Amino acid sequence: MKNFNRRSFLALTGMGALGATGLMAGCGSGSSGATLRYAWWGNTVRQQNYTRALEEFQEAHPEITVDPEFAEYGAFQERMTTQMAARNVADIFWIASSQVMTYEANGLYRRLDDIPTLDLSDYSDDDIASFSFDGELLTMPHGVFAPVTRFNETFLEEDGVELPGEGWTWDELSEFLIDYAADNPNGRRGASYTPDQDMALEAWLRQRGQDLWTEDGSTGFDAEALGDWFEWWRVLLDEGAVLSLGEQEGMQPDFSAVGDSILLNFGSSNHIIDEAAMFPDYKYRLRSVPVGEGAADGHRFLYFPRLAIYSGIDDDRVEAAGQLVNYNVNNSDFLRTVGLTMGAPPNPRLLQEAYEFASEDEVEMLGVVEAVREEERRPRYEAPPGTGTWREALSRASEGIALGNAGVSETAESLIAEIQSGIDQGA
């Protein structure tokens, strides 16, 4: 196990001192069975679904007891920070996307491919390689996202308009959104103002042959590409094609508040499940984000939300932990209980089985992910240590442009410098 890396820990937390409140003592196991702590995040519905799934697992494996540790996303990360400092992490835990490599640098992950109770036979060698870090399988994905444009098909029909064709470009979408907002009979806007949508930004950068992050843990994009992204959104804002900050009440608009006034938005493919449910009278569809002319080969990508087994777990509980991870990633009964809010199954067998019980919105999501999965994709790298707050920095930069506080070029250069500074401090 790696030594605790204090510098990357401070970069993760943004704090110089931490309390040790709220810690739970680790549970041991006797000869009759094992007790496992399982930590995850989400809303109340997800808490209920996963609690029920964990109960079903225990019914099938009465020798294993599962102690759930649930929290809202922000509180989950705060708790992980405190538990990481105390080396008192749950036996099995979900990993926030911005902390994947920070946790790796701090040695939180136990190797997975030597656990006999975790069945990897459904996954190809390419799958395992894409899940691994430097050839080591340290985490397992429990979902798959793709960057998408989600649009309201009901609004298209009501307003008598059609989106550009499937092979649309960013310029075509921009022109369409400007015309739509200016002329639709119901006074709707084309979209909300969300240049801080990280999956869409990453798609934009990869189409230009750049990346969010490099293999050696640095920023992988330049100020020109980032500035062009900000400018694309600034034009839409100036033309009234997207909601203003005031109309959407800040940089993270609540879809329940804006969904009935916009035609489309950008996001992760799994978002259709929760957000379409907010407007059951509307029909939503997904489409891959636009592609710029001359896009780089292999620009498509998938994102894997991950879980891990704690490196400090007692050896006599490893096989029990492997059984629980196996239930998460390889069992269709588990998937039926928890649903697909964490994305399409990474297991290709489960992905096909999921079509049998998926809702209409879930089928839409599965189809988009499956299509991207079949395309050529160049490697994608996780956020390095020190980037725990990069999304907040992106939001501040986007807000500053909307408010006219700084120019596009200046903002792009400053943001890259800020993100790189965090990486340097976290190294």
Image: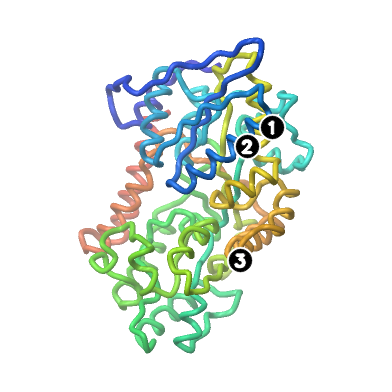
Q: Secondary structure at mark 2?
A: helix
Find residue 360 and name its label. 3
Can you name the residue that lies furthest to the right here? 121
Q: Is residue 297 visible?
A: no
- Residue picked out by circle 1: 60
- Residue picked out by circle 2: 56
Q: Are marks 3 and 1 in contact (CB under 8 Å)?
A: no
Quadrant containing the C terminus is: top left
Q: Amino acid at mark 1?
A: Ala
The answer to which image quadrant residue 224 occupies is bottom left
In front of the other: 205 or 340: 340
Q: Is residue 375 above or below residue 91?
A: below
Q: Which color scheme does this rendered protein use?
A: rainbow
Q: Amino acid at mark 3?
A: Glu
Residue pictured at 23% horizontal, 59% vertical: 406
Answer few, some or many: residues within 10 Å of disc 2's Cα (few below 14, many 20 plus, some between 14 and 19).
some
